[in-house]
Every structure is written in structure tokens, then in C-alpha cells.
Image (spheres, grey):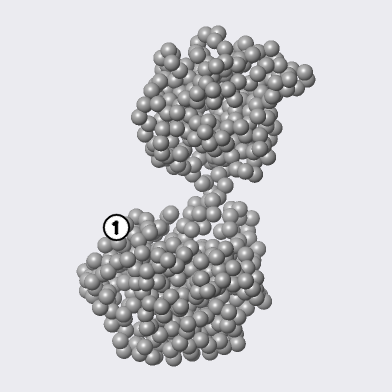
Amino acid sequence: MERTQKNKTNKYGTWYGILFILAICGLSACNKDFEGKRDFAKTQDTVLDVRTSKILYVIIDGARGKSVETSMAPNLTKIKANANYAYESVSDDSGLDATTWTDMLTGVNKAKHGVTSANFAGKQLTNYPMFFKRIKDNSTLRTAAFCASARLSQNLVSDADVNQSFNDDDLAVKTATVDELKRDDAAVVLTEFNSVDKAGAQYGYDNSVAQYQNAILKIDGYIGEIMAQLKSRKNYTNENWLVIIASNQGGAYPVNPADNDGTLFSKPLLNSYVMFYNPAFNISVYEKPNTSAIPYSGNNIKLNGTALRGTLSAADASIFNFGTGVTAPEYTVEFKLKVHAFGTLNAPIFSKSSSPANSSTGWWIIHNGSNGTWRFAGLSSTTITSASAPLLTVGKWYTIGFKIYNESAKRWVVLYQDGEKISNPVDVTSRNVDNAVPLIAGQIDGYGNTATQSITDIRLFKAAVPDNIIKEYACQVNVPTTHPYYNSLIGYWPATDGTGVSFVDKISGTRNFTIGGSPVWESFEDTDAKFCIPFSPEIYNKLPRGVDIPRYIYSWLKIKTDNYGLDGKVWLPVYNITQ
């Protein structure tokens, strides 16, 4: 995940220089990895324990993160100087305020809390309560909620010393919050505003719309008043307040086609905002991951020589005996190849033959010299080369393979590279290449030529996959169950397992390549425009989300969360240390 940091002068002077013990995290592990799993509740720091940890949590319904960012709201801009924040978070894909509120107050997703309708039917809050409950179970802290929306107050807030709703009156919510912060025992305060959402619903959810922009600025003014009261508390220096300001979601608004990357990040309805503030925090923005190119990543093995190669036993490799004549089945074979070094001339790549240098039965794919072309032989009485394809280069991934199909009372073979057909069909009707030898990924016994290369994503379809499907899926790095010919797979070896001494067949579970020698799995992460890797839902976890907030609150209050079944992640703060 990308992030930017700007060190700011800390107006609290040397006091925060004392924070060194806790801020070790901010200087090392946290700065390296915002996704660290350390829970504050499992640590004891000797400095902040002398102050009372407290929470102010402000929810702004319908505040699109990107609109908040460009609104230049003066108080939010001032606050972010000591905040860790994200403008492009993604809320629940349902777009329901009931669901997003419940995420934000329970710390679990809808699969657990059960809120999937506007009326909160089916809610499972006994096992996954609103966070006040956990706080009351572990402390005597005062809890107070002031909500503009009666639906939120009545359906979600529990275990509150004060729970008030104000009939969509944000001014009254602000006044009640300020009054609560005047109390010496104020400790955990939840505030919810909804006028921004109402302005967006009526006029449009974008700050190019004056009414929406003005609604954001009005709430910004209320936040300024709330923060002023917070900092004027007579015991403020003896308290350690975490201030959370977040939107439950954004709102529907037309997207410029040029800005639509096909992910949930491009849906304004789901564009939420999350900010964690404390005067000791360093400014740090969690930025949206690059969605223009998802890398191919995992662990692979660099095959080299007869010791370090993949071997599918002769018995298991019988599925690569393709038969003869037009009555034999059709097949499609594909795999990904990355050459680390071409090595000696004509090194084998992938073969089912005792030797690619003579007339032994079988078939083989080998490098054509070491100039970046490759050739295929065995099924055909002639050698077929990749001369019309782009040259293979060191350090790049390519998808190569062949298809055997029946047409016009004959049997044919044709080659592919990166989904493109790179040879004319060759008649193999009379060729019988079945044998009882293993399938080898890498060098063949008795054949000294060798290259250093990685082979992954090995696919065997017992079908002639159509050209358009081959092209569509060659750029992907796995075979999804949605592939039109998924049920025709008779072997699939991702070869990115990362452990052990085999490439596991995901179809049979037992027909595995054995890796000889002492294989070393090496991690890789390669970005290439040719990849069209589907986005994993995990990409949305690269930014703080509403469901993460309760876990952050528990951690701040040093409440252990091991048995709560939370879905939210721990986000470690980035501290600013000024000596």
C-alpha cells in the first residue's frame, strides 16, 4: 500500500518526546506495514497509562470521501495535521445505511450482524453488540450517544448512559455533544450527523453542487466547535482522546468514464471517509492501491538442471497422452513461463518425451536456440516455431501453449502465446505420440541443455477451448470457476504453492509434480500490462473501513478483542515524535 507522510511541528513540545516507547511502533513496524496485527490491548506502555484513554466518534452520513478531500473544510483540514486518514475507503457494497452503520458500530460484517435491510430485520446484535456493550463489560467509562437519526439510535445504540436522538436536527446534536464534553466524566461519545446525506439525496453527492458543499462546511463548523470544547476540558492534559471522524458511505453520483477503474473504488455511493486523530499522531494518508495493474504475486521455484525440475510420474502423466485420429479427444494445454536465464541452446521447457533431440515418441516444447523463440514438435512430423510471436525476454511472464482439435475430418495442432494464435494449424491426424514416460517441467535426463526458468499456472483442458476464450483468460493468473470451460479441466497446477516439494494439482489433489533436489520457494510480485488479474476483495482492506473502527476503539481503550469475532483490522497509528 502506498502512503505519504509529512512531519509536522508538534505544538505540545517536549511532552510527546516522552512518547518514545509507544512510538517505537510508529517509527519501525507501523511505518513499514500499516496492516500489522499487533493489538494495542495486548501491550502496556508506561507513559500513556498515566492518562485516561477516551473516545470521541463522529459519524457524518453521506459524506463522500473525495468530496470531503476537495471541500477544503477548514476544521477537518486543521485536524488532519495530526491524523491518519483515508479519503477513498469503501463501505459495504449494499449501499444501505442500516448495514454500514451496523458495520461501524459492531466491528463485524453483515454475514455476522445480519443487517441487510433498511428496517434492521434479522439483526444479530446479541453475539455482535454495539461497541458500548464491550466497553461497559470492561470498564466503568461513561457512554453517551447523540444521533440525528432515530433509526440508528433506536436500533443500534445499547448500553449507553445517555442515548438521545434529535429528529434530523444536526444543530441539536452538536449542542448535546458540546454539553456532554463539558462533563468531567465524559469518556466515550458517539455523535451522528445526517444533514450532509440529506443534502446529497436532494441535490447531488458532489461538492460541485453548492448545497452539498455547504452542508459539508456546516458540519465542519460544528466539528470545530466540538473540538474546541474537547480541548478546553479542564483535565484535557490528563486525558488521551482518540477522535474518529468517519462517513458511513457516500452517495450515488455520475462517474467520469475516465475515472472508472471497474472496482468499488469507482462507486461514489460506497466512497467513505475515515480519520483517526490524536495530537501525538503524525499526518499520514492511507492511499487507494494502484488499480491500473494488479501484480502477479506468490511463490515460485526457479527450475534448473535435472535435479531441480518438476516431474509428473508416468502413471499420472498419462492424461497428457493425447491419442490419435479424429476420434480421439480434443485438448488445450497452457502454462506461464518466466525465463531467468536462457542458459545453453535449445533447453527443454515442457515435455513428455525421452528426448526432444531424436524421434522418440511424445511431444515437447523447447527454446529455439536462445534467441527468445520457442518451438514445438512431436505431435507433428515437422517442428512448429514461435517465429511470428514477440520474443521471450528474461524476467517477463508469458502464457504459452497449444491446442489439439478436430475439424474437417482431420486432427490439428496450433500454438498460442499470450492468448494469440502464433502458428498455422498443422495436420496431426496420423500421429500417435502416446508413451509411458513422465511429464517434465524443465530439463530432460540425458539432455544436457538447460535454462533457469519458472513454470506456473499449468492448465490442461480435455476440450478445444475456443480462441476467444483462450485470449480472454490467458492474461489471468489462475482459472476461475467462472471460466466457460472450467468443467473440462482435468489438471490444474498453479505451481505457486509456496511450501513443500511439489506442484499440487487442484483438480485431483493427488496428481502432483514432484520437485527434485532442494527446491527453494521464492516470493515474487510482478506487474505487467498484459495481466488482467481480477481484483480480490482483499484490495478494499488496504484502507481503513468503517468495520475496522470498533476494533481500533477497543485497542485504544486496551480492551482485549480475542473472543469478539471481529472482522475489522488493527490499524497501528503513526506517531510524531518531537524532542
Q: Using the rendered image of the protein, determine whether residue 228 is visible from the camera's viewpoint.
A: no
Rendered location of residue 330, percent (x, y): 68, 25
Give the residue drawn at x 57%, y 88%.
Answer: 166
Q: Quadrant of the N terminus?
A: bottom left
Q: Which residue occupies 28% across, 79% down?
A: 51
Q: Quadrant of the C terminus?
A: bottom left
**Would you name the residue on which mark 1 appears?**
28
Q: In terms of depth relative to the viewer, which is nearer, 213 or 397?
A: 397
User: Farthest residue in the top direction?
Assistant: 359
In this rendered view, identify the residue nearer to me: 12 or 25: 25
Residue 507 visible? The answer is yes
Residue 530: image quadrant is top right
For badge 1, the amino acid type reads Ser
On screen, residue 368 above or below 513 = above
Q: Residue, x 42% and y 28% (percent of image)?
A: 515
What x and y, as percent, mark residue 69?
50, 68
Asked if residue 165 is positioned above or below residue 59 in the image, the reply reads below
**Residue 208 place in picture, x, y as percent:** 60, 70
Q: Quadrant of residue 4?
A: bottom left
Q: Residue at x 61, y 12 (%)?
A: 382
Dot 1 falls on a residue whose secondary structure is loop
Q: Nearer the viewer, residue 320 or 295?
A: 320
In this view, 208 is above or below 238: above
